[in-house]
Amino acid sequence: MLRALHSAASGMEALQISIDNIAHNLANTNTVGFKQRRTQFQDLFYQTLVSPGSSASSSTEIPTGLQIGLGTRAVSNEIILRQGDFVRTENPLDLVIEGSGFFQVRLPDGQIAYSRAGNFHLDRNGSLVTASGNPLDPQVSIPQGASEVTVAADGTVSVRLPGQNESQPVGNIQLATFTNPAGLNNIGKNLLLPTASSGEPVTGTPGQNGIGTLLQGALESSNVNIVEEMVNLIVSQRAYEAGSRVLRAADEMYQEVNNLRR
């Protein structure tokens, strides 16, 4: 009975984490470049009452044994990196990465962070920056008075200045890839940092060496599937409810044992 209490409680705690993760996914259905996370579970250690394969007699072995598990726990919430849908905006500063890769963003402390969100703006110096004001790395600046900004699939940024008939290149946007992008560390504001699990970033020109290309005038939507998340929520709710019933049943059995002397 005590095992049942602890197992049910561990399951309810793990499912609470799953529901928290689902809530986070649903809250970010309109976040540009957001990637869904999926909770993964792992069973806890077992109490072995009879070992599988132990001797039943001098000539026979027990085929399966008797092991009682002691519950579960949430061990990770993996980033699902499938491409989100594209939304056309016609804003020349909105960019989409078609394929793998991340924009490189320089933080105020000089550290480089990575992002899939391509909703860029111009600061007072004409530099391309994120919604939080962090510039791209390498930095790209648009000259004052430019009448047309063009971003090619390979990241070349060109502008047309007053009095000129042809566009002039003013910079190049480079992207970064990782051996294990699911191992990146989310720090909020659509930014991720590399870890020992993700590996070191490999930077390059869009369209080369497996790096995705750029599409101007569009944004990548969140890849959260609302229907899938609602189904996961229902499953988690029902499992949580079942766990609470097991907890109640074990408590009632424990109460019966306590009342045997009455």
Image (tube, helix red, strand yellow):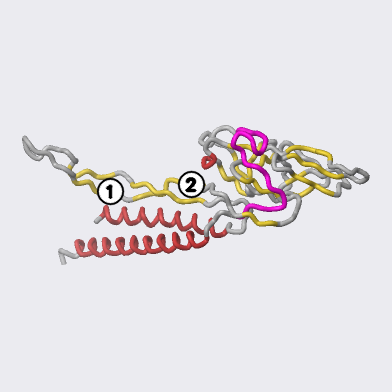
Q: What stretch is highlighted in magenta?
A: 202-221
Q: Which amino acid does label 2 sit on?
A: Glu
Q: Judge from the rendering whether residue 93 lies leftward or rightward of residue 189; answer left or right.
A: right
Residue 128 at x, y percent in the picture: 76, 44
Residue 233 at x, y percent in the picture: 45, 61
Residue 61 at x, y percent in the picture: 12, 39
Residue tagged 1: 69
Judge whether residue 204 is colored magenta: yes
Q: Judge from the rendering whether residue 244 lies leftward or rightward of residue 137; answer left or right.
A: left
Residue tagged 2: 78
Quadrant the N terminus occupies: bottom left
Residue 226 at x, y percent in the picture: 52, 61
Viewer-nearest residue: 125 or 47: 125
Q: Distance between the residues labelled 2 and 1?
A: 25 Å
Q: Judge from the rendering whether residue 88 lies leftward or rightward of residue 66; answer left or right.
A: right
Q: Are marks 2 and 1 in contact (CB under 8 Å)?
A: no
- Give the residue furthest to the right: 163
Query: Which residue is drawn at the image coordinates 75% and 50% (left, top)?
Result: 93
What crowding class fits label 2: few (fewer than 14 Cα within 10 Å), some (14-19), or many (20 or more)?
Answer: some
Viewer-nearest residue: 148 or 186: 148
Quadrant the C terminus occupies: bottom left
